[in-house]
Every structure is written in C-alpha cells, then in structure tokens.
C-alpha cells in the first residue's frame, strides 16, 4: 500500500487535490471553510494510517486497555493540536505559506465540540491527550450529543441561551463504526424462566433503541499511539418505510423515531447540580451499556468465555457517578447473557471498576428515585436490589445494629438509589482529584466506607495537557521557553523547572513580559471583533473564568470591584494601578441566582464605564460564551488568576493550573489544587487569603456565623450592598438584587445566611488584593513571580496525572 508522504510538498499536493475533488475549485477560489476541510482532511489521512497500525499493534500485544467512561468530553477544536502532536507544525506552516493560506484564518472554521459543561468534561479531554502521549491503550466513551452546551449571548446584561448545533456541517474527525452498532433496552418487565435447574431472567416487552458508534482518533504526541474517543448516537429501530407511509402511519413512525433519538439530542447544562430527570437516566444507561457490550464483544473475540481474564484485559473508569450503571450492567451481561453465577459476576465486576469522585457538594450527588429506576431499567433495578441486600448484610457484620450508619451507606435507601454508594462499594479503587479533596472523601463523605477498606481510597491530583494549554494556545511563550531550555519540556513537562534560573536574567524577564504583551494584544483583538469593546493593554489583565456558581464566588470578586469603585468615587485622591477585570462564565439556564450575579457584573461594568474617573482605573469585560477556544486566548493574556472558591468546596480546579502555566499569578483560597499550587510556587509567588477548610467546617457546625455583624461593622460592604437596592446598580428595577441581598444577609427558606462566606472572607480578600497591587508596581518582582509560576507548573501536566492513575490503579503496559 503506498503511504502518502507528509512533507510540505505532500501536504500541498493533498490540499490542492482535495479542493479539486471535493469542490472542483482552486486554492484561490476556496473560502475559509473549504480550506479548513481540505487541510483537516489532509491531517486526517495522515492520522488514519497511524490509527490502523496502532490498533493492529494493540491486538498483537494482547495488553490491557482502559475504557474511560464519561458523560462529558469537552474536547475543543482538534486541527491545530493534531498537527502539533503529529510533529508536523513546520511542514504544514511551509505548505500553507507556499499556498498563501493563513492558518489562523482557517482554524476558527472548525466547530468546537462542546460536549461538556466544565471541569469534569475538560479533564476527560486532557486525559485522552495524555493517555495517547503516554502510549497507554485507551478508549474514551460518551454520548454523541447532537447539541452541545448552549452558546451564551448577553442581551441587556442578561444571559440568553442559544442552541449549539455543532454537527450542522458535519464533523471531519469522526467515522461511523456501524459494525459495532448494538441494542439498548428500556422499560418492559422481567420474567423468570428455568434453563435446566438454573433460574434465569429476561426482560420482555422492552423498547429497543440502536446505539451507533462514531469514532474520533486521539493522536499521541511524537509517538505511534492513536487511541479512540467513541461517541454513541441513539437511533430508532423504526426507520420510516413506504408501507407505513401508505397506511397513514407516517406521522406515528416519525414520532416514535424522534422519541428514541432524543436520547442523544442534547447535553444537560447543569454543572454541579443534580436533578432526577428520566431522560438523563436513559442517557447514562445508554452509553454505558453500549460501551460495555462492545468491550465484552471485543474481549470474547480474543479470549472466548474465559471471563476470569477480563480484569487483566479491561479496566472501566467511572468518571463521577454518571456512568455508575456500568456496575449493574456488567453484572447483567455476565449473568443473563454469559451465564455466570452471581458470585463469579460480582467478583469479576468489582475487579474491573474504578471510580473517581469530582464533587462533595450535596446537591450534586446523584440519587435516582426508586420507581423511576424500576420503570426505566427493571432488570438493572433487580440487580441493584440484590447488590444492596448483600452490601447491607456485610455492613451489618461490621456495624451491628447501627441502622442509621448502614442507611447512609446503602445503595438503596429512603426511596432512592444512591449512586456514590454503589460506586464506592463496587469499585476496587476510589479516588479524589486533589490531595485536600482525597482527604475530605476519607474524613467525611466516604468516612464509613474508608474505615472498612482503607486500601482502595486514594487521591490523584488533576492535571492539564500542556500540549493544548501551552504549546497550542501560547506559541510565543513556547518559543521563548524552547530558546531558553530546549524542547525537552514538550514531552516531559517537569523540565519546565529549568526555567526558574532565568528569573534572575533581566533580558529574559523582558522577553517574558513582551510575550505577555503580545498575548494581551491577541485578546484585545478578539474582544474588539467579538464584542466591539475596546480594552487597554496597559491595564492589568485580571481574570476569573469558570462556570458560574455561588461556591466559586464570582460574587466576592464583583463586590470587591464595587468597593473599589466607591473608593474612587468617594475619595478624589484615591488611585490604583489600572486594572481590567475579565469574567468568563456560563450559568446553568435554571440557576436563577447565578444569572443574577451575571446581571450584577454587567451592571457594574456599565456603572464604571459611565464615570470618566472610574474608567481610568477600572474596566470590566464579561467575555461572552466562554468555551475552550476562548480560554485558549484568554488564559495566555492573563496576569492575575482569580481562584476564590469557599475552602473545601472546589474538588480540585483545573483552570487554576492553566493560568499558572501561562505565567499568571494566583489570588486564591486554600482549596482544591490551589493548595498544591501554593506548595509548588511557595508563599512568595501566590496570594492566599480566606478561611481554611477545617475552619469553614467548624463554622458550619457551630452555626454561629452571622454575616449581618460584618455588614454592620464594615462600612464599605454596607455601602456597596445598600447600593444594590437603592437604584445605583439597577436604576430602572431597584428590586432586582433583592434575592441576593436576602440570601447573603438573612438566609431564605431556612437556609443559612451567606453559606459560601462571601462576607466572612471579604476582609482577607481585600488585604490580599492590596498586597498584590503593591507588588505589581514593582516590575522586576512581578516578572519573577510570573516566571516562577510557569517554571513550577510542570507538576500539573496531565501526563503526570495519568502516570499516577496507571501506577496506582490501572497497571496497563504502554504500547511498544
Ligand atoms: C448531575 C449533575 C452534575 C453535573 C456535573 C453533578 C456533578 C458534575 C461534575 C462532577 C461537576 C464538575 O465538573 N466537577 C469538577 O470536576 C473537576 C475535575 O475533577 C474539578 O477540577 C472541579 O473542582 C470540580 O468542580
């Protein structure tokens, strides 16, 4: 088979040829979309042949493979990252130059697959990059949502959601794997029957839906490994046929088809907030069952019915509880379809399943109503009942007569299926995503399980792929680093530490500052093009970008800006270094309070813009539709990274790591991975403020916190919050902020006032800001801090994270 050569000449030929064959046009005639397709499908050809070889090698090696099950994969665009991982940057640059094509104009033509909400989904995407780069055989599995996370628009300072029809023009990177289509059953009821003297179960009168897989290649960096991200699409079995059309059943057939296909229609936009919606339950079962069916089919091809071998060949990683139904589904497949005994099946299942928890927030923990589970998945529910019966029996031995304790640990209790308990009880490994989070799991959320089996609990600190978050998103810094320390850091991020000595080098510091300015200009251009707003690059760029949530405390940032504004207005002699506050955040569409916070930020922006004196020192820009591509421009331009979560609430955070790697200095609480950023950079290169998580817990337990006292004693807070209601912020609707005011000072519906301790931490945050602004004025000091942040960020590469998962949990041999 002739292999295509991918030097610049080969790339040029391929692009020209594709334009001719696909569209019958020349390079000069092609529009950016057509050029994008020609370039992307050239890279795809290059990847395809590697993919085939990689698959063949994996089969020959008979090794173990991880199936990473996640309801979200927030991948971002692929073309540029693929070119980088293929180590073909120079070849493409030269080819495109000779064809007079501007790569930066065609990259934005790729629709961004936004198949995720935030941290959990983006982590899964970073993991896919690192798995392939570490040559570990892996398949990611999720749903092929036809509509990804909504696009956000601001209208009159308020968030409006628009549908994200990302597949409208097709997707260059996926190929359908029709041969692996399988069937998923919902509803019906369970029937018992005998096979010899064995009791067997089958589901009858169920509704069957096809699951059709689409595969996306995941290219490892500078190696021969190409893994797969498999997305499952729901397809009705009732294709419309002419007969039913003739019989007047056309509309009915159409309706049934649509009912089935809604399963993969849209991504749920709630992040860290659980609602027991039947469609969501169906989504979770749909892609887990499909993935398990495929994995078993694949296993049997090589090892027949020797299921004892399964845990040596497959490990299923459950990314938060959403794919937790993998546990009873594996039991069902092994018992009902393969004829194994309950004991055999549960032993094997337990040795195959590993679970990562990503949140301790009570309102985010999945609990399904028993009757919904029973109706939707009757056989799965039966299995859950039996799992629960056996678990409770064991628990009773360990904790005799401690019914309340057992109730909290049970899989089924108080009319609900408790997914976290299922995952903890039935996995061989349970881990948190930062050291602090791991400790909280052991000490509180899963404490009673921890006491029973300490060995299976662990903590593995999250990471980010430095290929996307440094090489791809910050080429200027990448070049500067390469000039200084060579390019070893590209495959081994720990080498970034070699940069630290350059902090003492004045010429290097100057270049580092120039790179930051270059990236600030890049953001300036984007903000102008997308939102028509002018920003001044001499301002400090200060960013808080993450999902909008009360616990992340965008409110603390906003209230502080509000106070700064009042200082400027009240004191004609007050000055501060000019500071641009950037926000990027989507709010869940049904999360009213989060949407109010957006309105508050936008109203403040308007208020400040209206004052000639204030706008010399403060500017707020709310970046619309914060997504992966926007982050890639926003983060490299940022000088101050705001990581303000109430201590104990943010499991890890990963944005914090991206900012750090790009030379931003963090102002943050001792929460999640901020603690470890602090350990890496040392106390002189970070601004830590606020209560520690143990103190927060004590405060909750004592129940004595009264934010009203702070309100009454801190005149700056009092004035700002009073302006919420006196028409200063919302002149036309002075009652807009009433709910927030109430929630922070009085609490509502029996909830405690200010549960996220905005007022409690305000004073300490204010002081940290003051120190930071003083330091910023010392250019040399600030530049050193920025360099140290990049230099000590290597620990946060997801390559390190993946190595830890492999050493501690998966034990997979790298592909040779
Ligand atoms: C069912 C509703 C729902 C949806 C999403 C509940 C919980 C989630 C996710 C687990 C929320 C999430 O993304 N958690 C984030 O996971 C990141 C990756 O580990 C962490 O860095 C963040 O701290 C954590 O909030």
Image (tube, rainbow, N blue to C red):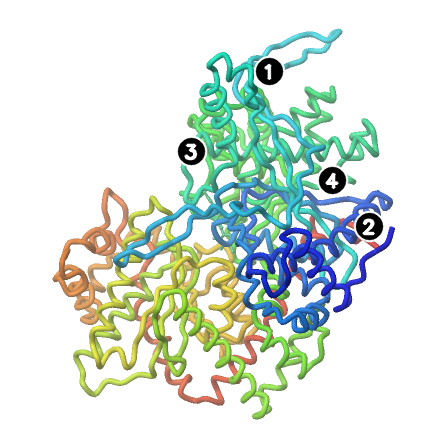
Decide which of tag 3 and tag 1 comes sooner along the chain. Answer: 1
CA gap between label 3 and label 1 equals 24 Å
Depth order, front residue of 150/719: 150
Would you call the spot at circle 3 few (<14 residues within 10 Å), some (14-19), or many (20 or more)?
A: few
**Pointers 3 and 1 in contact (CB under 8 A)?**
no
Residue 564, how many percent across, how many down?
Answer: 26, 75
Could you say which disc has been placed on residue 314 in the image?
4
Residue that label 1 marks: 203
Q: Is residue 234 above or below residue 510?
A: above
Q: Is residue 68 above or below residue 233?
A: below
Q: Residue furthest bottom?
A: 506
> Is residue 428 in view?
no
> Dot 2 lies on which element?
helix
Residue that label 2 marks: 53
What residue is rendered at 62% in x and 28% in y? Answer: 329
**Pointers 2 and 4 in contact (CB under 8 A)?**
no
Q: Is residue 554 above or below residue 188?
A: below
Residue 420, how many percent across, how many down?
Answer: 52, 38
Residue that label 3 marks: 276
**Pointers 1 and 2 in contact (CB under 8 A)?**
no
Q: Nearer the viewer, mark 4 or mark 1?
A: 1
Decide which of tag 1 and tag 2 comes sooner along the chain. Answer: 2
**Pointers 4 and 3 in contact (CB under 8 A)?**
no
């Amino acid at each position: 088979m002739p292999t295509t050569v991918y030097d610049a000449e080969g790339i040029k030929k391929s692009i020209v040829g594709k334009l001719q064959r696909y569209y019958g046009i020349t390079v000069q005639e092609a529009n950016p979309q057509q050029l994008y397709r020609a370039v992307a499908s050239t890279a795809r050809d290059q990847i395809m042949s590697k993919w085939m070889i990689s698959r063949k090698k994996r089969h020959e090696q008979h090794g173990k493979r991880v199936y990473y099950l996640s309801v979200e994969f927030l991948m971002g665009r692929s073309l540029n990252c693929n070119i980088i991982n293929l180590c073909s940057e120079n070849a493409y640059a030269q080819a495109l130059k000779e064809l007079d094509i501007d790569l930066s104009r065609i990259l934005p033509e790729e629709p961004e697959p936004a198949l995720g909400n935030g941290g959990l989904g983006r982590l899964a995407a970073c993991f896919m990059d690192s798995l392939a780069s570490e040559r570990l055989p892996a398949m990611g599995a999720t749903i092929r949502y036809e509509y990804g996370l909504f696009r956000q628009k601001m209208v009159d300072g308020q968030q409006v959601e628009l549908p994200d029809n990302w597949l409208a023009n097709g997707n260059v990177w996926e190929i359908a794997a029709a041969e692996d289509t399988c069937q998923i059953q919902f509803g019906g009821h369970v029937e018992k029957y005998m096979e010899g003297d064995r009791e067997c179960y089958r589901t009858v009168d169920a509704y069957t839906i096809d699951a059709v897989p689409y595969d996306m290649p995941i290219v490892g960096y500078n190696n021969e490994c190409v893994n797969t991200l498999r997305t499952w699409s729901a397809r009705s079995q009732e294709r419309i046929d002419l007969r039913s059309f003739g019989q007047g059943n056309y509309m009915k057939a159409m309706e049934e088809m649509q009912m089935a296909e809604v399963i993969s229609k849209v991504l749920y936009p709630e992040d860290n907030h659980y609602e027991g919606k039947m469609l969501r339950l169906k989504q979770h079962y749909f892609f887990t069952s499909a993935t398990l069916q495929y994995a078993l089919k694949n296993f049997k091809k090589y090892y027949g019915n020797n299921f004892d071998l399964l845990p040596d060949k497959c490990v299923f990683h459950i990314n938060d509880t959403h794919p937790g139904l993998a546990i009873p589904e594996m039991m069902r497949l092994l018992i009902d379809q393969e004829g194994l005994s309950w004991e055999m099946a549960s032993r094997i299942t337990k040795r195959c399943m590993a679970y990562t928890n990503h949140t301790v927030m009570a309102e985010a923990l999945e609990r399904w109503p028993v009757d919904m589970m029973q109706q939707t998945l009757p056989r799965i529910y039966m299995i859950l009942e039996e799992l629960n019966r056996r678990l409770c029996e064991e628990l009773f031995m360990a904790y005799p007569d401690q019914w309340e304790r057992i109730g909290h640990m049970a899989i089924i209790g108080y009319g609900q299926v408790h997914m976290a308990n299922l995952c903890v009880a039935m996995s061989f490994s349970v881990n948190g995503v930062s050291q602090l989070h791991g400790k909280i799991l052991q000490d509180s959320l899963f404490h009673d399980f921890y006491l029973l089996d300490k060995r299976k609990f662990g903590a593995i600190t999250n990471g980010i792929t430095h290929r996307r978050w440094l090489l791809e998103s910050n080429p200027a810094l990448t070049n500067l680093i390469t000039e200084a320390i060579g390019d070893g850091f590209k495959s081994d991020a720990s080498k970034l530490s070699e940069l630290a000595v350059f902090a003492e080098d004045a010429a290097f510091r100057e270049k580092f500052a120039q790179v930051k300015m270059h990236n600030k200009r890049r953001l300036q251009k984007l903000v102008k093009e997308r939102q028509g707003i002018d920003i001044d690059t001499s301002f400090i760029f200060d960013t808080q970008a993450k999902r909008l949530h009360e616990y992340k405390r965008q409110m603390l940032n906003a209230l502080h800006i509000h106070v700064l504004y009042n200082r400027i207005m009240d004191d004609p002699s007050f000055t501060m270094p000019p500071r641009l506050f950037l926000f990027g955040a989507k709010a869940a569409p049904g999360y009213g309070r989060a949407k109010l916070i957006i309105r508050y930020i936008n109203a403040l922006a308007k208020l400040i813009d209206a004052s000639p004196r204030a706008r010399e020192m403060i500017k707020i820009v709310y970046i619309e539709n914060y997504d992966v591509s926007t982050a890639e421009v926003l983060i490299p331009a940022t000088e101050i990274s705001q990581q303000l979560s109430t201590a104990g609430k943010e499991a890890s955070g990963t944005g914090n790591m991206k900012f750090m790697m790009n030379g931003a200095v963090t102002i943050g609480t001792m929460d999640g991975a901020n603690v470890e950023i602090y350990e890496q950079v040392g106390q002189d290169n970070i601004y830590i403020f606020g209560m520690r998580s143990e103190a927060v817990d004590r405060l909750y337990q004592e129940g004595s916190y009264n934010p009203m006292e702070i309100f009454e004693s801190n005149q700056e807070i009092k004035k700002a919050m009073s302006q919420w209601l006196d028409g200063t912020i919302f002149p036309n609707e002075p009652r807009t902020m009433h709910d927030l005011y109430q929630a922070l000072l009085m609490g509502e519906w029996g909830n405690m006032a200010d549960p996220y301790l905005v007022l409690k931490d305000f004073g300490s945050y204010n002081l940290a800001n003051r120190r930071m602004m003083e330091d910023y004025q010392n250019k040399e000091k600030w530049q050193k801090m920025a360099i140290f942040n990049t230099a000590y960020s290597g620990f946060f590469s997801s390559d390190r994270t993946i190595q830890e998962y492999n050493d501690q949990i998966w034990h997979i041999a790298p592909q040779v």
